[in-house]
Image (cartoon, rainbow, N blue to C red):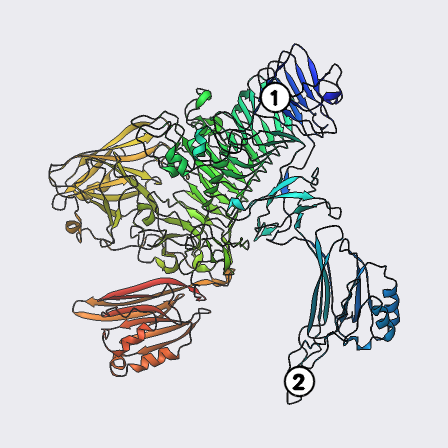
Amino acid sequence: MSHLNGSSSVVCPDKESGLQAWNPGHSEDHHVTIGYGRSVLLMDSATVHSIEILDGGKLVIADTSRPILLRTKHILIGNKGEMHVGVQYYHTKHNYFGRKYVGVGTGGTLEIHGQKKLSWTFLNKTLVPGESNQNSYLFQRGWGNRGIIVHVIDPKTGEVLRSTRTAVKDESRRLAQYVEAVEPGLLLAMVVNDEGSNNLEDMAKKSLSKLGSQHAPAPGLSVRPTSPPSQSLKSRTVFHCPLSILLLCCPGNICQAVLPHRLGGDAEIFTVRIRSLNPAVVSVDSNRRPPVLPAVRPQASVSIDLLSDSSLLELAERPVGWGPGDRLVVASTDYSMHQAEEFSLLPCPKCSPEQVKVRGKAQFLHMGEEVDGVDMRAEVGLLTRNILIRGEMEPGCYGNEACKFFDFDTFGGHLKVERGFRAVHVSGVELQHMGQQSMGHYPVHFHMNGDVDERGGYDPPTSVSDLSIHHSFSRCVTIHGSNGLMVKDVVGYDTLGHCFFTEDGPEERNTFDHCLGLMVRAGTLLPSDRDSTMCRNITSGAYPGYVANPRQDCSATSTFWIANPNNNLINCAAAGSEETGFWYLFHHVPTGPSEGMYFPGRTEHTPMGQFTNNRAHSNYRAGMILDNGVKTTKANDKDKRPYLSLVGARYGPHEDADPFKPRVPALIHHFVAYKNQDHGAWLRGGDVWLDECQFADNGIGLTLASGGTFPDDDGSRQEVKNTLFVGESDNHGTAQPDNRVWGTGGADLSGRTMPRGLNFPIRGMQIYDGPIKVQNCTFRKYVALEGRHTSAFGFRLNNSWQSCPNNNVTDITFDNVPITSRVFFGEPGPWFSKMQMDGDKTTIFHDVDGSVSEYPGAFLVKDDNWLLRHPDCIDVPDWRAAICSGHYAQIYIQTRNPANLNMLMVKNEYPDRPLALEGALGKRKHYQQFQPVITLAKGYTVHWDQPAPAEVTVWLINFNRNDWINVGFCYPQGTTFTILADIHNRLSKETRKTGVFLRTMQRDKVNHSHLSRGYYYLEPDTGLLFIKVKAHNDRESFAFCSVKGCERVKITAVIPKGSPPSNCMARAYPRHAEQPIVDVPMPRKLPNARLHSPEHFLEIKMESYNTRFFHLKEDFAYTEVNGRKLYQPEDGVMLTIVDGHDGKLVETKSFRNTILQGIPTQLDSYISGLADGSVVIVTSKGRLVTRGAWTKALERLGVDKSLKLKDKLVLVGFKGPFRPEWVHVEVGEDRVKIHQVLPIPVVQKTKL
């Protein structure tokens, strides 16, 4: 038991000695002051202007059997004042109402403790729209239960009192006796199973007639066959009962009836459904062969359903304290938070301990089960408490700025606790119509209290628990400049602005335990509270003339708004907001009254508190975001955005929030995110680790973004492991007449709600920049359609930023994910735009064990990025990717003067395949940054679309010690240079010179550079400045740069005025072209037996080429299928046929040029005879016949008829009713080649 005011036993406050009865009556002009040691007991309802309790005064609300209504404008609890309503663990049983505020000041005590009730729980059985979950009885029998089955039913409750079965042939007497014994006023339901009622004896018929029944045939009754005319006919016999209900269903094919009955004294109706199915009715054919009985066995069923305007809810826990008349809310389990529904509890004496009965039926589907391995049970929150603090409201909005956006009164009550209070514990209270659309007035507000737990001398620690805060006008619980508060079992429903809100940044060690927030709408107070309309129209705080960008400045309404990571969130649910469920953000410096409470940047490095077993769904932007900060300066002419607008911030947690101390990962454990329209989670940080999480039905499951703003970040160790991703689950949602995002999807191709547009590319794990690690994760039910690029792994769309080659993926399991839907790198079109941004072109990740690509150790790269490709790379057309091997790193090329140019980077091995980059930053920045991924130990040249920049800085990113590349930068004639090497230290923000580059007249000497002295070579006729960039220091695996800092080479150039664009490609090549070399051999494909999947890739390689040795010329052509090489024996074409169902080689067939010219129909006839689903591989040898009727046959294999053939041809085609994405043809004069994989079995994608 709890101790109150130091007593050794619990004493209800209204039973304490010394209390004076107080009945002030009703006067709105009465200003009440309770002080100087006076203790009063309010015995009856009262109305006063205001109450101030101070100087030892005490107000106690009596615990009476009748409600007490106290109406007042405010209650201020001052120094040593106390107010008590109930006591903890000894709960009052009356309602308490307030008007506008309850304030607890210095020295004040507030103890309010209502009856203990279960705050919220989960739905444990799915609630279907329009259904009641009240199938109260079901009886089914098959073989072995022949005869008449009788049920006796109570007409008042629909309960089956007893039942029996009698064999019709032998037990007519017992049936008669059983019926005679039935008490008057009860209902009887009878059904015959298997054998007819024509054996019913007169004794039984007479007993049934006493009930008012008549046996058919009889006047006014009809005998109707139930079988089709082609079948033998049997009768259906019906007994009509005016005084009770009796149905006798005789054997036929199917005999069924539904009998409604209104419950006595109640508006509810139950129905008795009786059904008989008899397979004895069979067809006999004209040849008199013995009939074959149907597979269906005889079956009889009786079900009793309650048809009423009520529903049964199956709950996960016993609803302690819930009672008739209480209100509750069931959360949405679809994308829209507006599918949350309120209900009132009804009496239910027959309910099990975990059931409640509510008035009405659900309009939407509410899941009550695990779906595809993800817990999607709807939260059920209790809104009613026996103590109610409610703001009295006007009928409409009046007198403030909020009326531009709301048509209802938003000036509710509020409860505020200020610094220096003596004790505050509030539990078991309902707060309704609380909060105001003005700063500082919230339903529950702890304001600048400092430490409110043991550290602050509070024993027991301060807490609010078991609260219901609903239909409020500004937040739910606000913690401002206060630490150590326990917020437990609180339900926040239908409020404006952030619900559970930490305000200025210094709030730490607060715990939100088992809190539920749902239906969180936009409010006007802060930019982050506002929606787009509010953001554009509220201009206070912005610099004059500033035009807001709502998606950047505002639009962040969140259920949990956490301004300092050192707070605990445990077992909480964010079940629907206009934007985000959980949002962690960072105040670079504390704001408002908290200014100066910590040093700049502290929160960005503060380790995260506990985040365990939380869930988020039905949010628009994301289930969870860890990113961004707020603008901590006032608007000015340099930064016109309003104070506290959203800005960029980066999170890199370190021990003691000290970036010089060891890193500390932020741990996110068992987080569940489903049905969030955009993201399940977007998490940006230096070290963010997720374990045992679940993501389902999100537009994008998870994005891990790197932790810093280069070059001041310290790298990233982000990882997700042991986690389940589900693309489109069996939670299909509810179709609505005006639903614009209802369409076909999922593995079952059923109708369902969609997260965004119908063609939105749903992704599970979105790879952005990195580096990240994805380990031991399962991806389930990601199925692409033709027109919708769903994929388990995908990439950020329209991305200008870098992609790290150290993005590692390992031990991945795919369940009900077609091999074609595992990865998608993007293509121009809807949502992907033109795929022209730098990050779209440089995507890459490392398939460490081959569990994605079937090639262990391979890198997956964009198929047209020739900075990363080599001759043995394997194309994956369905993914728009290539499987490659190599040593990869990055360089960041920063340019100044000018900064608005575009760059071309060319790998010398592929001079005809340059990579065009436009820069990661806007063209109006004072510098630009290009971030290509490169293959190490190779040569490159760099060119510009304008005169070369005066300053170029090359940063070595993800270079290990001794890694290098050679680069030639294009400059105009007459340029002079200063080139030096240095190291930039991100912590000290200092740059230290490490060496200089000297000019050499010998190009080979460039390769002899060392740490303190390097060489550059300026090639006069091409304009290329060659340098070798090499890393000289070790690097930690997670870091972008070396342990000593970021190694750089800085080129400062004096460019002659009037110089033309610095593009030297025409002069550089073919002089500097190099033969492509494979430095790292390609991994071998995993054997199909080790894949544990019904699908696999088939590797095919074909080549047609000629060789010359002096004047001798020789032609070659071959096809290689899964390592088996087949050479073409003669000039013409060779067709290699592979079974598209199992990938087995079927045969090869050659057609000489003479056949193609003379008998072209042979080829066409051969292709016509191939089975549909055949993969057809075509190579040519010699000089191909490029014209003639034979070419029409190629169109049947998927070749476009507009293709103009050349001397050499290779083709991978398909014979079938559709054209797979991997159909590919190459033509050329001397050499053509295709090396790719294709999925087996070959399956057509369903059209959107």
Residue at point 33%, 67% (across, down) = 1102
The image shows residue 845, relative to residue 462, as above or below, that is below
The image shows residue 1184, relative to residue 596, as above or below, that is below
In this view, the residue farthest toward the top is 36
Image coords of residue 837 (percent x, y): 30, 47
In this view, the residue farthest toward the front is 220
In this view, the residue farthest toward the bottom is 287
Which label number is shown at residue 966? none
The C terminus - image quarter: bottom left
Image coords of residue 513 (percent x, y): 59, 34
Q: Secondary structure at mark 2?
A: loop
Query: Marks 2/1: CA distance?
Result: 88 Å
* Label 2 vs 1, first from the N-terminus: 2
Image coords of residue 1057 (percent x, y): 11, 36
Say which of 170 and 343 sits in front: 343
Which label number is shown at residue 284? 2
Q: Amino acid at mark 1?
A: Glu
694 sits left or right of 303 in the view: left
The N terminus - image quarter: top right
Q: Is residue 111 visible?
A: yes
The image shows residue 219, relative to residue 502, as above or below, that is below
Which label number is shown at residue 454? 1
Q: Quadrant of residue 532?
A: top left
